[in-house]
Image: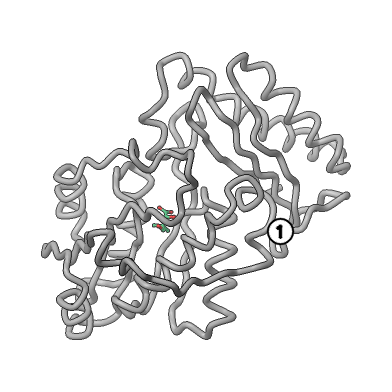
Amino acid sequence: MKTLSSIVSTQRFCLAAPKPLVIVPTMGALHAGHAALLKRARLLAGKKGTVVATLFVNPTQFGPNEDLSRYPRPFSKDQTLCRKLGVDLLFAPEANAMYAPDSSTWVDESQVSQGLCGGTRPGHFRGVCTVVLKLFQICQPTTAVFGKKDFQQCAVIARMVRDLFLPVRLVFADTVREPDGLALSSRNAYLTPDERAQAVVLQGALQEARTAFSAGQTSAIKLSKLIEKRVATAPIARLDYIAIVDGSTLRPVKTVTAGSVAALAVFFGRTRLIDNLHF
Ligand code: PAF
């Protein structure tokens, strides 16, 4: 496995690399969820193709009061995992290489990025779209793999790819969970044992909504209230948002159907966790 930080060297590597070239964009602090994405990438690339993992803690997708400075950066551990999983290139650029000091070009998706995480993290998806387009420009991937835990991120990237005619196939992989249902996230590492124990309420609340839906409850307001009430049983949980939306448009629905998605973000102490459920 090669590790590169230079953009020009990465462009050259990717241009010459055997195709298909499958990219897995990450911010590092890799866990079993990322491992699943990398394994999927290896399968999609086949033995002869190329797998590129990118590792970049993208400053432009963090708000001023978010966790950019404390975001975990276990670089050599990440490198070892990538090597073990058959990654061909680990691209880990510096922030000042990805963004010139007078950088002034942004990608702004203006529909599916509204509401949910876009509502409580203004500018987040502008940062995500901009960096993902830069990574696509550098690596020219045949296919890109993202995790479904970031449900809105998948929708925003799909819209960007469609609207800008980007010649890349998107693959969205299922969320990997701890045995108690907590979705794997690099941010789980911040949780104290008590916060970790209480964070299980996210899945509990979503599963309760699924059970109520299966029993005939289709009112989005009632199902949201149910989720909210269950989340409130965890004394330190502080709700950021709950939304029940159409799975394609991400617009709020009144009546829940099989195509609806419940998405939520909840703070446990200073740590904000997200999860979602496809009804
Ligand atoms: O999902 C992430 O880790 C990031 O948002 C991404 C897609 C790597 C862009 O920085």
The foreground one among 59 and 262 is: 59
Give the residue displayed 52% in from the left and 48% down from the top: 149
For the N terminus, the quadrant is: bottom left
* Residue hosting label 1: 250
Image: 72 above or below 3:
above
Residue 151 in percent (x, y) is at: 57, 53
Give the residue displayed 40% in from the left and 18% down from the top: 192
Give the residue displayed 69% in from the left and 66% down from the top: 111
- According to the image, what is the colour scheme of the structure? one colour
The foreground one among 138 and 2 is: 138
Q: Residue furthest front?
A: 102
Does the beta carbon at disc 1 come under 8 Å from ligand 1?
Answer: no
Residue 98 in percent (x, y) is at: 30, 66
Image: 40 above or below 35:
below
Residue 269 in percent (x, y) is at: 51, 22
Image: 201 above or below 36:
above
The reply, left or right, for residue 225 in relation to residue 91 is right
Residue 157 in percent (x, y) is at: 53, 67
Q: Quadrant of ligand 1?
A: bottom left
SS at circle 1: loop
The reply, left or right, for residue 101 in relation to residue 166 is left
The reply, left or right, for residue 105 in relation to residue 216 is left
Which of the 4 image quarters holds residue 7? bottom left
Give the residue displayed 64% in from the left and 35% down from the top: 240
User: How many circles with numbers are drawn on the protein?
Assistant: 1
Amino acid type of disc 1?
Answer: Leu
The reply, left or right, for residue 108 in relation to residue 187 is right
Badge 1 crowding class, 10 Å Cα cut-off, few under 14, some 14 to 19, many 20 or more, is many
The foreground one among 209 and 79 is: 79
Image: 45 above or below 256:
below
